[in-house]
Amino acid sequence: MKNSIKFLIFIFFAGISLYAQDASSYFPAVSGYIWNYKITPLDSANNENQTIAYYRIDSFAVAQNYKGKSANVIVSKASLSPGTPFIPLPDSTFISLEGSDAYTYYKLFNIDSLINLLGSGTGLPNSLPTNETGEWVSYYRFAQAENVPYPILLVDTSIVFNNIPLKVNFEIQGIHLADQNIATEMGEINCKKFVNNNIVKVYLAVLPILVTSFTISDTVWIASNQWIVQDIMPSTKIDLSGIGFGTQFIPGSKKYLFLKFQQV
């Protein structure tokens, strides 16, 4: 009898554990769900710049097939303040939930355009320029062992800048960290925590000489049935002296749920 009880207890907690690793349990079950975010840029010292903060509304629009997978489609619109009209953003986000993994349809940023922007002296846009094509990548792996890096994407490409042939290695590496409680407008929430490292290495094409190397890190907190409740990307220093542009910075950002204004 005691052994039977122990077996039932084991099955019960094993079931809870398996459910907790199911990626679909971290995404809203019904379309129409709304996320209200405040996004604050971070300067080169990672100080918040509230004067250029803005607001974004994400909406779980529909579930449909996209590029070979069953996907949840998120549409977004943004505004400089809660009291002004929200303008629809051009790109949608596609999330596919399979077993313990959450896939996203990822468009690689255009490194050639990025380097030109850094050298133009005009500063960076709010988002990195992207190529038109993309692919599904397993971004968040809820059953992954903690603190063990896992590969998400690896791309090798070539560009020519100022008549200099360059080879570019781009890698995304994910890490599942320990669960963490974070304070939000809705109170304290227990979250799954991930850090995604976007690693860029640029080499001279004719010689195996490293021109520059930098990592853009993005830490994300995901709550049960709510998806992303916080996302912090520190500013990133880039040494471009090897191609004549000195030191540049990609501004960081802090995104978190902000519920003090109404959906529009």
Image (tube, rainbow, N blue to C red):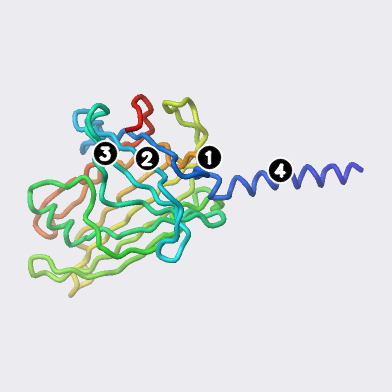
Asked whether disc 2 touches disc 4, contact meaning CB atoms under 8 Å apart, the reply is no
Q: In percent of the image, x 28 and y 39: which residue is there?
A: 253
Q: In percent of the image, x 21 and y 46: which residue is there?
A: 250
Against 123, residue 203 (above or below) is below
Give how far apart the Cα atoms at labels 2 and 1 are.
15 Å
Mark 2: which amino acid?
A: Asp
The picture places residue 154, in percent across and down from the top left corner, at 36, 65
In the picture of the structure, the residue carrying the numbered disc 1 is 224
Disc nearest the viewer among 4 and 3: 3
Q: Earlier in the sequence, mark 4 or mark 3?
A: 4
Give how far apart the Cα atoms at labels 4 and 1 are.
18 Å
Against 12, residue 49 (above or below) is above
User: Element type at marker 3?
Assistant: strand
Give how far apart the Cα atoms at labels 4 and 3 are.
42 Å
Near mark 1 (Cα within 10 A), the count class, few <14, some 14-19 or many ≥20, is some
Q: Earlier in the sequence, mark 2 or mark 1?
A: 1
Q: 147 and 38: which one is in front? A: 38
